[in-house]
Image: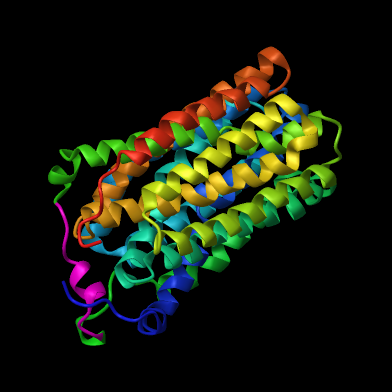
Amino acid sequence: MQTPSTSVNEFARGGTVLFAAFVGIGVNLASMVYYSSGIWVRPWQEEFGWSRAEIGAQQTISVLVMMLLATFAGRLIDRYGLRRVTTISLAGYGVLLLGFTLMNGPIWQLYLLSAAYAVFGVASTGLAFTRAVNAFFVKHRGLALGISLTSTGVMAYALPKFMTPYVAENGWRAGYVVMFLIVMAALPIVYFLIKDAPDAQEGEDAAVSQAQSGLSFGEAVRHPTFWKVAAIFFLISVAILGLIPAFIPMLQDAGLSPAQAGGLGATLGLSVMFGRLLVGFLIDRIFAPYLTAVVFTGVGLGCVLLGVGGIGYAMAAAIALGFAVGAEVDLIGYYTARYFGLANYGAIYGLQYSIFIFGAGVSPIYTGYIWDVTGNYDIALIMAAVLMVPVVLISLSLPKFENA
């Protein structure tokens, strides 16, 4: 294997691609829409009379669509390139955000729009942008992934902090118009700056050679490690991803104002950002499965504290949940590149992502159902902590990387 390029060369050569990935990941369907989802729960309940389980089904529908299409979208990117496929995807999903402002009561409108923007938006999720980052960075791949994915933390901080009071004052439809404008502003950045891989003339190093190496899709899915990795992130998504949109309503149910709930939600966002950067920095230095085990042990403890101790532990839970969301997509992309290579990254990551978001589809329904039946989220928090046990055990069973 050729000697990896220095960090100076990597960041100088891949800096614009890293910036485009940062922007694209921040505004995509799995980031901006996801982290704003808790903001709409109470307004929709009040205006349309929908239950929380019915509203939670919105996310289930969108992630099931993405699950079915993610591998196909990855193959499109592998074949036609990031710029063309991802820009079209981002534009289509952005335009559909405006459709939500036309809803007038029937729940099928919410479900139809959620399915439609998932069809268009799946090719502009981390599936696309982590491919570019993995291709341009080798020595500091983990750090670069962490930096690019920190934009999800920006959204996780800014949307609860600013959008929650904005929606309370101007209405939820105005919030969707703001999100549409954000996506439109990001489009030219992604189109002009994103690239699939370094050009050969930019330097003969590991990034150039690794961009064309790796297992085939069939070889990857026959490998036991593929299914261990998939099991880890499926369990994490089932445990955690229904709690994130429930976090702000949970705090408001406890008596906090929209501004107070948004402030604690912003703490979760800061934790996402810090988690992205810290995990990205550390996985270049510590064997990633060991780091996974440590991080998600802490996540389980945070969930126990909030579930058993109550709202007084909301800050600790916000930090723990933020770390969970701050680690998962970094680690999926990192594991995919290290274990299976980049030659068919789109298709392989697409299937990993499909499994991950299937869990994300299940999680909000049962989390909302628990609230509808019990009036709180305590059982969901305890269940999340219990699911962290197999996550830790499977992580510790993963094999060493080749060429480590």
Q: Quadrant of residue 199?
A: bottom left
Measured from the top left, where is residue 388 in percent x and y?
Answer: 49, 32
Could you tell me residue 92's position as x and y percent?
46, 53
The residue lying toward the viewer, choosing from 373 and 45, is 373
- Percent across and percent down for residue 124 are 42, 55
Q: Is residue 316 left or right of residue 71?
A: right
What secondary structure do most residues of the magenta stretch adopt?
A: loop
The residue lying at 13 percent from left, 43 percent from top is 218
- Going by the image, does 43 lie left or right of 145? right
Span shown in magenta: 203-215
Residue at 76% x, 30% y is 47
Q: Residue at 30% across / 68% down in the picture?
A: 135
**191 inside magenta stretch:** no
Q: Is residue 234 visible?
A: no
Q: Is residue 225 above or below residue 126?
A: above
Where in the figure is residue 193, as x and y percent of width and height? 41, 75
Quadrant containing the C terminus is bottom left
Q: Is residue 41 visible?
A: yes
The residue lying toward the viewer, choosing from 403 and 362, is: 403
Identify the image's colour scheme: rainbow, by chain, secondary structure or one colour.
rainbow
Residue that appears at 30% across and 37% down: 228
Residue 300 lies in quadrant: top right
